[in-house]
Amino acid sequence: MAMIQCISPVDGSVYAERQALSLDAAKEVVLRARKAQKAWAKRPLEERVQLVLKGAARLNEMSDTVVPELAWQMGRPIKYGGEYKGFNERSNYVASIAADALAPLVVEESERFERRIEREPHGVVFVVAPWNYPYMTAINTIAPALMAGNTVVLKHASQTLLVGERLVQAFIEAGVPEDVFQNVFLDHETTSALIAAGSFNFVNFTGSVEGGRSMERAAAGTFTGLGLELGGKDPGYVMEDADLEAAVDTLMDGATYNSGQCCCGIERVYVHESLYDAFVEKSVAWVSNYKLGNPLDPETSLGPMANKRFAKVVREQIADAVSKGAKALVDPKLFPQDDGGAYLAPQVLVDVDHSMAFMREETFGPAVGIMKVKSDEEALALMNDSQYGLTASLWTRDAERASRLGREIETGTVFMNRADYLDPALCWTGVKETGRGGSLSIIGFQNLTRPKSFHLKKVTA
């Protein structure tokens, strides 16, 4: 069988490799998960919740291993300490709402009838996780799926090959039964064959639009439930009454943190003409303060992109935009570590417009375009001029104005004076080519379970 490799962006070496499972071996994994599911679902809810929390706690104890592994696998600087803040926030929140989210909806409980809707686990949930936030994105589904009584099979991206092993190791060491939570290494062909065979009761995929289409094609005719979070081109809009300093700080961080490799990263900013010049000047200064370098160096604040081919896409988009009249404002001399490969300097572009791929296609790198606008109407039209819709970040002191605009934006989440954040109490969802379904919140539990109605008539007369 084929070997799956993680090529480290740090130095281009093969950091890890694992043998892909054959289709027969993968089917055995699923069979074990299915056999284990009924007994797991019969355990008391609170017991399942506590075991998941213990698994999360055990992963926290592994930080000395996890943090440098992340740097080697996908380039995030050790300075930032991994993903524990968001990982713990999401785990703890879904644990706190599990009982309410999974409680029966009682319609009637009288001497004559009991009528209620209960939530029942799907069965075996397949989680296909991405490399950019490999722990946080995975836990969005793993934690509530296990708490709800499903068993979970996890397949991680090749770029973060070791993450699935670490997650399963932590949860098994914490007491979760081995067949309840399993990690697999699969090639695309075997993955598609498993889905096409109806092996899973629910599939959650986070990745590219083309990857999502492959999932849908594989699942066609099986009636397997799918949750898809795909591409994004998230906008920010800075209105004339915005807190300028706060807007620059948050939006530039949202555009460049993690080398811009964020599902909900800011990729385009529209600024009211009254603040435009000041916003651009401050943004260029903000971005220019990064220290690009080896992510294992504690002083590094911007690591390499996860793979040199991802950086190539960003460079090509920037070059195309510049050839069409855009101006790149960040001095490349400030970043001599930019090697033309995975190490990529951040960039701010102006004189951009929507004829450029840079303002329409997902960039997924530390580069952002800024456009001047005159009105809410102009900004709204530009924000909606996209095939994607995950988040939008509005900057104003007027919450009513933000709400009114937000209702017109084709997006999954509307932020006011915030960006690039996932609130576990709210549903994480997208529209258009960003995908369908939703994770976290009460709705996340509903998507990982199915309703079962009970109509119990106590009398026959």
Image (tube, helix red, strand yellow):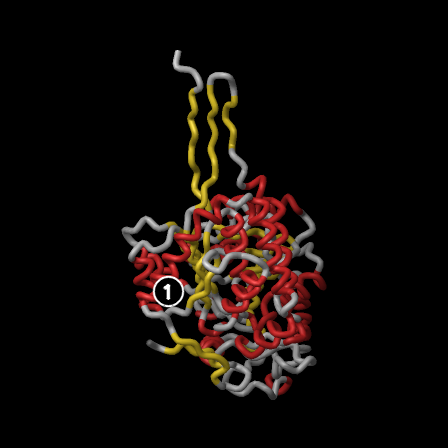
Is residue 307 rendered to the left or right of residue 292?
Answer: left
Is residue 278 rendered to the left or right of residue 413?
Answer: right
Q: Residue drawn 59% across and 84% down? A: 332
Residue 289 visible within the image: yes
Is residue 38 rendered to the left or right of residue 77?
Answer: left
Q: Residue drawn 35% across and 68% down? A: 188
**Residue 57: where, in percent of width, then height?**
64, 60
Secondary structure of residue under mark 1: helix
Vertical position of residue 203 compared to residue 8: above or below: above
| Residue carrying label 1 | 210
Q: Residue drawn 63% across and 69% down? A: 62
Amino acid found under the numbered disc labelled 1:
Glu
Q: Quadrant of the N terminus?
A: bottom left
**Residue 97: where, in percent of width, then height?**
60, 44
Neighbours of disc 1 within 10 Å: few (<14), some (14-19), many (20+): few
Front residue of this view, candidates 434 and 4? 4
**Residue 136: where, in percent of width, then height?**
56, 62
Is residue 16 rendered to the left or right of residue 76?
Answer: left
Front residue of this view, candidates 262 and 88? 88
